[in-house]
Every structure is written in C-alpha cells, then in structure tokens.
Image: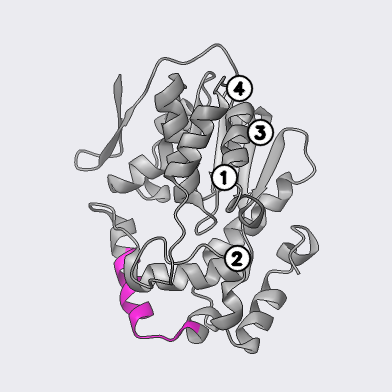
Amino acid sequence: MQKEFKVSDTLSATLEIPEPRQAESVFVVAGHKTGSVLLTKIIADIAAETGLPAVPVEGDVWRQGLSLSDWPAELYAFLEEPGYVFYSFRWLQKLPEVAAFEKARKLFMIRDPRDVAVSYYFSMAKSHGLPKAGKSRESISKLREETSAMDIDSFVQEGKANPILRNIARFANYLDRDDSLFFRYEDVIFDKRNWVAQIARELSVDLSQEICDRIADKHDLRPEKEDPNAHVRSVTPGGYVDKLSPESIAYIHETFPVFFDRFGYR
C-alpha cells in the first residue's frame, strides 16, 4: 500500500507501506558515514527474502525532497504504529519524542569520528547524492560548493562535519540500555557474514546462514585502491591517519569527547 504524507499543495512524499507483523516495531538509526547505506541495503535484502515489513522512512522521504523540518505530524504518527522495522534513519532528530521509539528495540550504528569526518569531506566534495528538490537539495548543493573550495583540514576545523558528529554523539544517551544495541563499523565491516546473521536475529526473522552469507557477500565491497570519486571510497578503518593533520585530530577529540569517553574510541 502506498501512503502519501502531505506537507503542502506542492510538497509531499509517498511511502510504500507493507502489512505489519504481530510484534512491536524496531527502529534502526545509523549516523551519516557510519556504514548507513550498507546497513540500509542489508535490511532491504533481508526484507526481500523474508517479507519483513521494513520501511526506509528517512531515506525515502529525503530522496523525494522532504527535509527533517518538513516532516508533517502525520508522518510522526505513523512511527507510533506497531509491527514495522523503521530504518534508514541518519538523524536522531525528534525520534526521542516518539513514544514508540522510546519503548522500542533500537539498533544504532557508529564509527570512529575521525573517519566519519574524512568520509564526509570526500562525500560532500565528490559523491553525495541529491534529493530531487527542497531545502535539503539546496543545503547540500551549497555545502558541496563550499567543500570543493576547501582542503580537508579546513573542512574539519571550520566545523563542517560538526552537525553529523553532534548527531552521532547524541546516540550515547541510549548506551547501556537493555532496549538498544550498538554496531561499531570497525567491528563489522570485515565480518559481514556474522553481522548479517546478527541483524536478522535482532529483527526476529528466520534466515538461513546460506542466505545470510549470500547477502553479506553481495555487499562485501573492498576497493583495491582508494577512489575519491566513489561512494565506497575506502572501507579500511583508521584511514584518517593519512588524511588529517594533528590539529584536525585534536579538534575532533576536544569537540566531541563522547566518542572517546563513552563509545570507546582511542
């Protein structure tokens, strides 16, 4: 079933909504440049194999031109409904105000903030997609223009990556909660077969190891050499060492201590 979420006569977004299952909803939130696209694709493949009622809410409405500030009350009301896996969220944004989110099982994905900043720089300068219209298209186009005229250290030290790092830092509010599970990019990126099986278990779907392996292998992309123009530029953790100056690394440490004090990065 398709459902339209209307903001105005000229702005709306449509979601494909499957029949819900008899279960509480699950929310999946992966910060920008933490492997969010990879996780979204894996969940989509699990849904295709099993009929899991999974709805990529933020990603789908973003591509149709709805920025977070555009979301109508009706869309937030949909997130209160049971029986779905709501995924493709990057921004925590107003999710803590959704009663179902606070009570639901939550899966989060994080990554070393220094690698996030590097990946975000190259994404903004080279490869990040654009929604078809709206304020998000305008803001990303502006940031892309700014980024193309900056070196990576200026980008970091002028705080261009701060909004996405600040967003991921907010995930720490859900650490040590029984209803929340955190995936670290560094722990799963080279162990995708076990990771896909774990995701399937967390989403309460029955998936054979053979199918898990097939899904994992499909997405196990490992570029032989770095490609700054590709979405999958490089997958190896710790690449920031060769990209960021000591001053940029210190800036991230000082500005976002939660990654080191709470998330365990060193």
- Nearest the eye: 6 or 181: 181
Q: Amino acid at mark 4?
A: Ser
**Residue 192: image tag:** 1
Foreground tag (1 vs 3): 1
Amino acid of disc 3: Glu
Residue named by callout 2: 237
Amino acid found under the numbered disc labelled 2: Pro
Disc number for residue 102: 3
Q: Is residue 22 above or below residue 245?
A: above
Q: CA distance from mark 2 to mark 1?
A: 15 Å
Identify the mark nearer the N-term, 2 or 4.
4
* Residue 128 visible from this viewpoint: yes
From where the camera sits, is residue 89 visible? no
The disc labelled 1 sits on which kind of residue? Answer: Lys
- Judging from the image, what secondary structure is the residue with disc 1 in? helix
Tag 1: Cα neighbours inside 10 Å, few (<14), some, or many (≥20)? Answer: many
Where are the magenta residues, as a range?
139-152
Crowding around mark 3 (Cα neighbors within 10 Å: few <14, some 14 to 19, many 20+) is some
Q: Nearer the viewer, residue 9 or 121?
A: 121
Q: How far apart in space, not on screen, are marks 4 and 1 (Cα)?
A: 18 Å
Residue 2: x %, y % from top left? 28, 23
Tag 3's secondary structure? helix
Q: Nearer the viewer, mark 3 or mark 4?
A: 4
SS state under label 2: loop
